[in-house]
Image: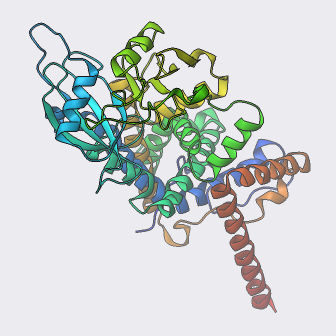
């Protein structure tokens, strides 16, 4: 079945794909056919990628709550009668006794009553290098509740990690990321173009209530598209911030203007003794040389105002400090971090989220909102709703094309040559802006250039055939 997955299609009372643009028009009237043609083809070519991204994104939005159900035994424990927790060092020792392989990469103490402590191990045989083995410990009695692979700074467990990888790269590795970047690169174009087309109509032609058939589908398609457009554009923009190619351009720009995300300095003058050596229990702090230990490090971090949840990263070597960081991505965001000398227990560096550059903060909030952690359950519901809206918009686009399938009108876009009616003072800046944008967002620019090349070739072929028919 052929389809027209445009965000907002022209209604039957407007210019349709069979109508030629009139000559001598200026401004929006002359630009509209170009927007409509781009909107049409972008929808046709990109819709399959968007459909996959929306479907997997919907699954990801639901994975947070599913994770809590599936891994409830590991993540939750009954609260002790007196509510007293064991020292963190004892919890770590219990984890190392049960899982002696690998090295301690970090520790996430229980962030709230009834939550387990996570001891994160690196270098464990059978665990991918980009993941850690999270050992879950009951903070009240030291019972080890189990161990699961953990991925990323949000602490994703196997179920959410699997769905996240499906959404990001279809489990195809780095090559698979091209699909999601292509979808993100074009989503804002399709959504923005549809929004412009919808509000560019005359008021009388927007009154589609009570209609049937294709016009009814258009009414649903357009109304939902208008309400969802801002959210879809936001998802597109935030998705590009950590994509492969456009994300690199964004990172380069942020670095050039001094808006990168700062990090705490973990170096210790003089090497800090032998604190990098760990004893048999694997406790990052129970070292052979001078080391104040995990409990003292955590106490110092608390005195600097670092409240739960936090992550304690062990010193990487003899010249490194402990780094304690807040890991709350929800609102209000807690991302302060401190470096603590393992030999003396003194704070050597402090980095406050309040001191982040503006773009670093916006990037952090944007990514966290995109991944469903900034506002918790409400954020996840909003993401699921946007994913459903995008799925419906694509399905309605297919249906409109099917409903319009009458003879040669089936799926036919606006005729070529609409650009000739666009005034030079509009066309030249527009083409320059598109070229610059295509350079920084290559999975927008390359497909667009390919489309133009194919379109020109097809137009030339059609022109020559026409000339031969009249010869």
Q: Position of residue 243 (x, y in %)?
A: 56, 49
Q: Is residue 177 left or right of residue 357?
A: left
Quarter of the picture containing the N terminus is: bottom left
Q: Nearer the viewer, residue 468 or 83?
A: 83
Q: Is residue 288 left or right of residue 231?
A: left
Does 232 appear above or below 302? Answer: below
Q: Quadrant of residue 270?
A: top right
Q: Residue furthest right?
A: 425
The quarter of the picture where residue 438 lies is: bottom right
Q: Quadrant of residue 38?
A: bottom right
Task: Tell me the residue at 67%/23% (across/down).
Answer: 357
Q: Residue at x 72, y 80 (%)?
A: 462
Q: How many marks?
A: 0
Q: Position of residue 263 (x, y in %)?
A: 59, 29
> Looking at the image, which is closer to me, 41 or 217?
41
Residue pictured at 27% horizontal, 38% vertical: 280
Above or below, comparing residue 344 to residue 75 in the picture: above
- Of residues 26 and 211, the one nearer the viewer is 26
Closer to us: 71 or 57: 71
Examine the rendering and report whether any part of residue 136 can be seen: yes
Query: In the displayed structure, does residue 136 sit left or right of residue 310?
Result: left
Quadrant including the C terminus: bottom right
Give residue 282's position: percent from left, percent from top.
29, 36
């Amino acid at each position: 079945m052929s389809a027209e997955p445009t965000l907002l299609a022209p209604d039957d009372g407007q210019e349709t794909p069979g109508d030629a643009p009139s000559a001598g028009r200026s401004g929006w009237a002359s630009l509209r056919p170009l927007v409509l043609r781009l909107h049409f083809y972008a929808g046709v070519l990109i819709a399959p990628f968007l459909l996959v991204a929306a479907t997997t994104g919907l699954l990801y939005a639901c994975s947070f709550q599913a994770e809590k159900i599936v891994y409830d035994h590991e993540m939750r424990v009954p609260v002790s009668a007196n509510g007293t927790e064991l020292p963190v060092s004892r919890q770590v020792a219990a984890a190392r006794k049960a899982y002696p392989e690998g090295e301690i990469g970090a520790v996430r103490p229980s962030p709230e009553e009834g939550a387990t402590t996570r001891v994160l191990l690196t270098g464990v045989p059978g665990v991918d290098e980009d993941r850690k083995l999270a050992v879950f410990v009951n903070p009240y009695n030291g019972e080890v509740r189990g161990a699961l692979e953990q991925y990323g700074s949000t602490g994703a467990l196997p179920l959410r990690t699997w769905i996240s990888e499906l959404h990001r790269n279809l489990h195809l590795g780095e090559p698979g990321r091209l699909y999601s970047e292509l979808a993100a690169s074009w989503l804002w174009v399709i959504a923005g173009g549809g929004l412009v087309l919808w509000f560019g109509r005359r008021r009388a032609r927007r009154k589609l209530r009570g209609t049937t058939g294709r016009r009814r589908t258009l009414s649903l398609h357009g109304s939902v598209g208008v309400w969802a457009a801002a959210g879809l554009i936001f998802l597109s923009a935030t998705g590009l911030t950590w994509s492969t190619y456009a994300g690199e351009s964004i990172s380069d720009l942020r670095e050039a203007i001094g808006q990168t995300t700062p990090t705490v300095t973990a170096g210790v003058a003089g090497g800090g003794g032998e604190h990098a050596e760990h004893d048999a229990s694997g406790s990052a702090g129970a070292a052979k040389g001078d080391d104040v230990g995990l409990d003292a490090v955590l106490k110092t971090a608390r005195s600097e105002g670092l409240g739960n949840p936090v992550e304690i990263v062990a010193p990487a070597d003899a010249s490194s400090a402990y780094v304690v960081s807040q890991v709350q991505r929800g609102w209000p965001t807690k991302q302060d971090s401190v470096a603590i000398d393992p030999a003396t227990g003194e704070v050597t560096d402090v980095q406050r989220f309040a001191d982040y550059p503006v773009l670093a903060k916006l990037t952090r909030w944007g990514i966290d909102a995109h991944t469903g952690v900034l506002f918790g359950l409400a954020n996840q519901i909003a993401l699921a709703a946007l994913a459903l809206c995008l799925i419906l918009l694509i399905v309605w686009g297919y249906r409109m094309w099917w409903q319009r399938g009458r003879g040669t009108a089936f799926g036919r876009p606006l005729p070529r040559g609409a650009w000739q009616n666009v005034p030079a003072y509009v066309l030249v800046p527009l083409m320059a802006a598109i070229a610059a944008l295509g350079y920084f967002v290559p999975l927008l620019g390359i497909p667009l250039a390919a489309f133009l090349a194919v379109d020109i070739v097809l137009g030339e072929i059609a022109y020559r055939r026409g000339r031969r028919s009249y010869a």
